[in-house]
Amino acid sequence: MPKMKKCFIMLEENLVKRLEVAAKVEDKKRDEFINEILKDSFDRIIEERNIDKKALDKFIEDKLSFEELAKIIGYEKARAARVTKRIGAKGKELLKSL
């Protein structure tokens, strides 16, 4: 089982009720069901909202650390971004194409 960490969030009451019923239908605990939903949709949301490109921009501007960037775009792409960032201004255009 993967390492788990508590995360307290506020959800709309109606959403919580729907989650509870859906989890019950799936014979799962609510937390387990929410984890599955997040895993299944997270990468899609990252792409749809251009969070990966925004993260690269913040990394270029020194507003996001290498470790934070790697959590969004993956370690290998983050390594390439770090090397490219070191190249300088010409590297910024290459970073945006990653």
Image (cartoon, rainbow, N blue to C red):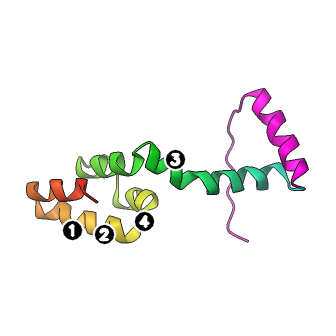
- Per the model, the C-alpha gap separating discs 3 and 4 is 15 Å
The span from disc 3 to disc 2 (Cα, nearest Å) is 23 Å
Contact between labelled residues 1 and 2, with CB atoms less than 8 Å apart: yes
Judged from the image, the secondary structure of the residue bearing numbered disc 2 is helix
Q: Earlier in the sequence, mark 4 or mark 2?
A: 4
Which numbered marker is on residue 61?
Answer: none
Q: What amino acid type is highlighted by mark number 2?
A: Arg
According to the picture, the residue beneath numbered tag 4 turns out to be 74
Q: Which residues are magenta?
A: 1-26
Which disc number belongs to residue 45?
A: 3
- Residue depicted at x 35% and y 49%: 55
Residue 19: quarter of image:
top right
Locate residue 35, reporting x and y percent.
70, 54
Mark whose residue sits in front, 3 or 1: 3
What is the x, y in percent for residue 21?
A: 88, 41
Q: Position of residue 76 (x, y in %)?
A: 36, 72
Query: Quick one: 20 or 62, which is closer to the camera?
Result: 20
Which comes before the other along the chain, label 3 or label 4?
3
Q: Which mark is residue 79?
A: 2
Q: Amino acid at mark 3?
A: Ile
Mark pair 3, 1: CA separation: 27 Å
Q: Are circles 3 and 1 on residues that touch, CB within 8 Å? A: no
* Amino acid type, callout 4: Gly
Amino acid carrying label 1: it is: Val
Residue at 40 percent of width and 62 percent of height: 70
Quadrant that contains the C terminus: bottom left
Q: Quadrant of residue 83?
A: bottom left
Q: Does the stretch in magenta take in 63? A: no
Query: First in sequence: mark 4 or mark 1?
Result: 4
Q: Position of residue 8 (x, y in %)?
A: 69, 42
